[in-house]
Image: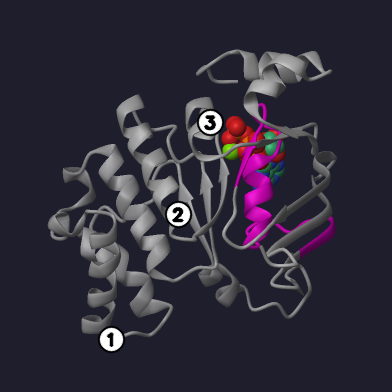
Amino acid sequence: MNASPLIEIRQLVTRFGEHTVLNGVDLDLYAGEIKVVMGPSGCGKSTLLRCLNRLVEPSSGLIRFRGQDITAPGTDVRALRQSIGFVFQQFALYRHLTVLDNVSLGLRKLRGLRRAEAEQKALQELDRLEMAGHRDKYPAQLSGGQKQRVAIARALAMDPAVVVFDEPTSALDPVMSREVAALINRLHDEGVTMLCVTHDLVLAQNIADEVIFLDQGRVLAQDSIARLAKDHADPRVRAFFGRDGDKA
Ligand SMILES: Nc1ncnc2c1ncn2[C@@H]1O[C@H](COP(=O)(O)OP(=O)(O)OP(=O)(O)O)[C@@H](O)[C@H]1O
Ligand SMILES: [Mg+2]
């Protein structure tokens, strides 16, 4: 593990009007690491992720990415968004584009690659996720799990330093969720750095030894799910993790 974290979040505060959503979040993510963030609905998990690529502007605090303060004015947001890949619950694929075009579009538009180069790179990523055979299909012709693979291929195609997942399995059935868990584990073995927000205890258990529990705008606990469910002093934490497989 490197000495300094790839992403370093310090005392992050985010307010929407009077509503303080994040109230002093600290989090480190090291290269090659996978971290899972859980917490009650509305506790600010998506907001935390959105601060990372400047979709939300923090009210105070610090986010360093590769040692640079990304909340500073003058940050190259476009470059930042290429370095931090996002994968969402609803896949966010373009319905009118084929699988290949969904994955190659960013390479052409953001990276300026020619079509042939972009498609070659896109096919490599699709192949890595066993989706190359579906290259000419449209999203409507794919299962949820396959759509999520395409969304992950699209994120990976940009060679991001980190892939951030927001509820990657909440639109999937349990079988497909397990497939996504297996895929995330494989990417972890390949050295991909990941930060994953999820309500899915099975996913969390499958991909990480410990989870970060966010509550009332802060990191309230960080431990294995088993210990959080059984031993944590706060009954809300025990209740959250005690309901196996259930949503919060
Ligand atoms: N752009 C915004 N403007 C105002 N309020 C917002 C905005 N985005 C989020 N919020 C509020 O911030 C709080 C946290 O939202 P967020 O989406 O981060 O929660 P979450 O932990 O991801 O919830 P869930 O588990 O349901 O996805 C909510 O009360 C939400 O209504
Ligand atoms: Mg959310």
- Circles 3, 1 touching at the beta carbon (< 8 Å): no
Looking at the image, residue 244 lies above or below residue 139: above
Q: Which residues are magenta?
A: 35-63
Type of amino acid at the residue the image marks with label 1: Arg
Is residue 97 among what the camera can see?
no
The span from disc 3 to disc 1 (Cα, nearest Å) is 41 Å
Under mark 3, the amino acid is Gln
Mark 2 and mark 1 lie on one chain; the one further toward the N terminus is: 1
Determine the residue positioned at 82% across, 18% down: 234
Question: In the depicted view, which residue is nearer to us: 45 or 229?
Answer: 229
Chain-order first, disc 3 or disc 1: 1
- Give the quarter of the figure containing the C terminus: top right
Closer to the N terminus: mark 2 or mark 3? 2
Quarter of the view holding residue 115:
bottom left
Residue 46 lies in the magenta-colored region? yes
* Direction front: furthest residue: 1
Per the image, label 3 sits on a secondary structure element best described as: helix
Q: Which residue is mark 3?
A: 205
Mark nearer the viewer, 2 or 1: 2
* Image quadrant in which the N terminus is located: bottom right
- 58 horizontally vs 165: left or right: right
In space, the residues marked 2 and 1 are separated at their CA atoms by 31 Å
Name which residue lies at 84% across and 18% down. 233
In the picture, the disc for residue 189 is 2
Choose mark 2 or mark 3, whichever is in front: 2
User: How many angstroms separate mark 2 from mark 3 (CA)?
Assistant: 16 Å
Residue that badge 1 annotates: 114
Task: Answer whether labels 2 and 3 touch (C-beta < 8 Å).
Answer: no
Disc 2 residue type (three-letter): Asp
The answer to which image quadrant residue 150 occupies is bottom left
The residue carrying pointer 3 sits among few (fewer than 14), some (14 to 19) or many (20 or more) residues within 10 Å by Cα, namely some
**Residue 15 locus on image (x, y percent):** 81, 46
